Amino acid sequence: MKLHTGIRSLKLWPMLSMLSMLLLAVAAQALAAPAGDQPISLDTAGGTVAGTLHLPAGEGKVPVVLIVAGSGPTDRDGNNPAFPGPNNSLKLLAEALGQAGFASVRYDKRGIGASRAGAPDESALRFDTYVDDAAVWIAKLKADPRFGQVAVIGHSEGALIGMLAAERAGAAAYVSLAGVAEGPGAVLRKQLAGKLPPTLAADNERILASLEQGRTVAEVPPALAMLYRPSVQPYLISWMKYVPSQRIAALRMPVLIVQGTTDIQVGVEQAQALKAARPDAVLAIIPGMNHVLKEVPADPQRQMASYGDPALPLHPQLAGTLTGFLRKAAP
């Protein structure tokens, strides 16, 4: 009886050995996936959030960066239907990171691009919904055996989303790219200053003050409805409770603050204010870089053209600034 059992075990051994080798080969193949773009998604209770995973050439574990896009309908590649065409700023950023050996994930936020179906009704959307999604992305990447340290790069409004998610999910490093220091109310006041007639300016201040105190406003002039329509007010209230210069101090990881000098949307003073709030952060001011991360002078016509020019490369100093920091902070 014992001899029979032993013989059966000996017969099984080659099969088990082959199975083990097959599993090892599958694991090695997963770690050596083809370089370049491939789809990736995040399944949530509210729907699927679609993204793109960019893998560098080579084998073994690599560091990975979550790239969070900016405000409005800006998609994973950095493009916005309000622009004259695609600029592909975030796609180019992912490719530059890949050339330096970093994997990256960029994604369409809920209600945008391929994630359009994942958005709740506008009246139910909250700023924290975007933060929650980014935090889950970080957790997903941390659990993926292909990747080592997880860093976050947030661009424009995505800088605040990424900041809060990096803190919540424990990212290894954080980069603010053209992010603001002031709260949304202060930013809106600056953007609209001198652009509204006196009556509308007074209405704008009345509405902003109420939203900042957490109260919705019933009476909104038609000229301001695009900004403050009733269905979007709960989202604005949820956003206005966060002030980036206050939250950046709470981060427990290395921080890089990057700002271009020809950014017509976010001024250098915003980056300097973030640095003042987080003195140990690395501050990089890049001469001649605009909001879509290209080397463009302050000339309005050339600025506008750059927002729709995918052939225009990233500013030549940007990739080195980012990867130099990330190699030290999130190797």
Image (spheres, rainbow, N blue to C red):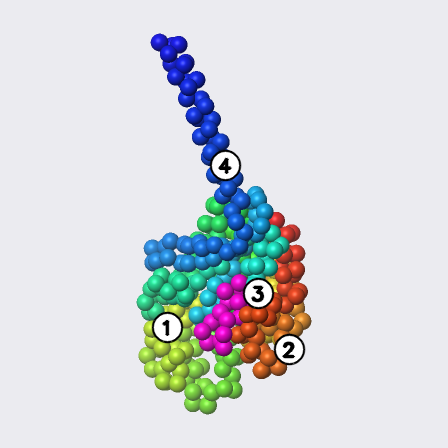
Is 85 magenta? The answer is yes
Task: Pick the quarter of the image with the N terminus.
Answer: top left
Which residue lies under the disc numbered 2?
297
Which residue lies under the disc numbered 3?
177
**Image position, residue 216 (x, y; %):** 35, 74
For the stretch drawn in magenta, the main secondary structure is loop
Residue at (45% x, 86% y) in the render: 201
Q: Is residue 13 above or below residue 322?
A: above
| Residue 25: image tag | 4
Residue at (46% x, 69% y) in the render: 74
Q: Farthest bottom residue?
A: 198
Q: Is residue 155 above or below residue 217?
A: above
Pointer 4: residues within 10 angstroms few (<14), some, or many (20+)?
Answer: few
The residue stretch that appears in magenta = 77-91
- Asked if the residue under mark 2 is in contact with the one under mark 1, i.e. CB atoms within 8 Å, the reply is no
Q: Earlier in the sequence, mark 3 or mark 1?
A: 3
Which residue lies under the disc numbered 1?
232
